[in-house]
Amino acid sequence: MPGALMRAEIDEQPAQWRRFVEQCRPEIDRAVQLIGDAEPSLLHFVARGSSDHAALYGQYLAQTSLGIPSSHSTPSVVTVFDRATRFPATVQIALSQSGASPDLVAAAAAGRRAGVRAISITNDPSSPLALESDVHVALGVGAERSVAATKSYTTELLAQYVLLERLQARSWADIATAVDRLVGVGEAALRAGGAWARAVSETLESQDRALLVGRGFSMASAKEGALKLIETCGLAASGWSSADARHGPIGQLRDGTPVVGFGVGTPGGESTLDLLARGTAMGARAIVIGETDLPGAEAVPVAGMAQLPAVLVPMAEIVPIQLLALELSVRLGRDPDRPVGLTKITETH
């Protein structure tokens, strides 16, 4: 049945979050020790695809919680231009579901040659990226057989949250309590998002584009949500900071174009609401993942999400869009488990 794998993997996510926080502790604490010993001036993130969006979340998290500057890798500096980069005191955090993309491995290896200490977060402890690191944190979500990443993406977010919380000396008991709250909201997102996605997919069949926006931690949700709609539905979707979206991307809107807002009620949420208001004035269809009283906007209320700390919201708010991508893809006669032209491991060099 088309989409059966993706549906099962979306549904697994809350249980995977609880399992991760129970099993990751030795690896996370080794990573904490490495960062503490290195006393870095910079955290350097290496990732591609959905993991790249997870790394964007990590960059915001590192800078807001630790005050450490963070940077994003540009693998083509190594793989295309064959140039080495000089780093200050740096810890590299590499994220990949497979841990096998050649350009990520090459970028990580180049950092190691430059004296950078390395942490990897992947779903395969025997992968080349895992072996290219000082400490590996296993996602442990089991085989992700649908090409569209779902449970690996949200668990990558969670892994970074747990790592940064431990770096701030938060106890494992307190982290487990926070994750229990997240699990409850994730289960609510599955219930609310499933009914909403089935209904709204019927009204989006004729649309050829979508704009997804968020600020801060939720900018990762906008980019990841857009990717899910692109790869499963062939929609011309784009994900932006709601601050940047008014500088050009808003021009893609037409009557009925869906504009999806994330992170409303978190820092930066007012900017997102302002962008959605501009969109509705242009005839677009404003959708908020969460609660809103914005005139003309369609809310997807998820019980408990408004009470989550902003840093945990991206793990829950992406679930309804994963479900929408699934339902719309099937309605369009596609198989979201096997998107046209895509494979699980991206062989970028």
Image: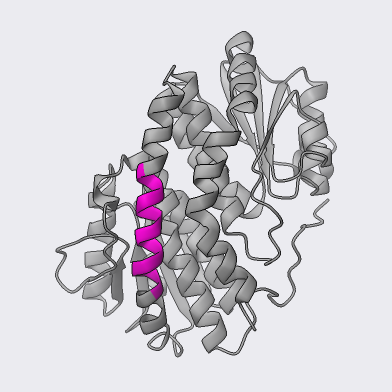
Most common SS among magenta residues: helix
* Residue 152 vs residue 261, the one in the foreground: 152
* Residue 80 vs residue 148, the one in the foreground: 148
State the residue at coordinates (16%, 65%).
Answer: 294
Look at the image and name its color scheme. Answer: one colour
**Which part of the image, by quadrant, shows the N terminus?**
bottom right
Left or right: 293 as drawn, with respect to 338: left
State the residue at coordinates (69%, 66%).
Answer: 147
107 over 347 or under it: above or below: above
Q: Position of residue 275 (x, y in %)?
A: 28, 61
State the residue at coordinates (37%, 79%).
Answer: 257
State the residue at coordinates (37%, 61%).
Answer: 189
- Kindly indicate the quadrant of the structure image that contains residue 22: top right
Figure label count: 0
Is residue 99 a member of the stretch shown in magenta?
Answer: no
Q: Position of residue 136 (x, y in %)?
A: 71, 31
Q: Position of residue 125 (x, y in %)?
A: 77, 39
Question: Does residue 313 appear anywhere in the picture?
Answer: yes
21 over 201 or under it: above or below: above
Q: Position of residue 346 (x, y in %)?
A: 77, 57
Question: Does residue 216 appear anywhere in the picture?
Answer: no
Provide the residue span drawn in magenta.
181-194
Is residue 182 a member of the stretch shown in magenta?
Answer: yes
* Residue 84 vs residue 329, the one in the foreground: 329
* Residue 79 vs residue 221, the one in the foreground: 221
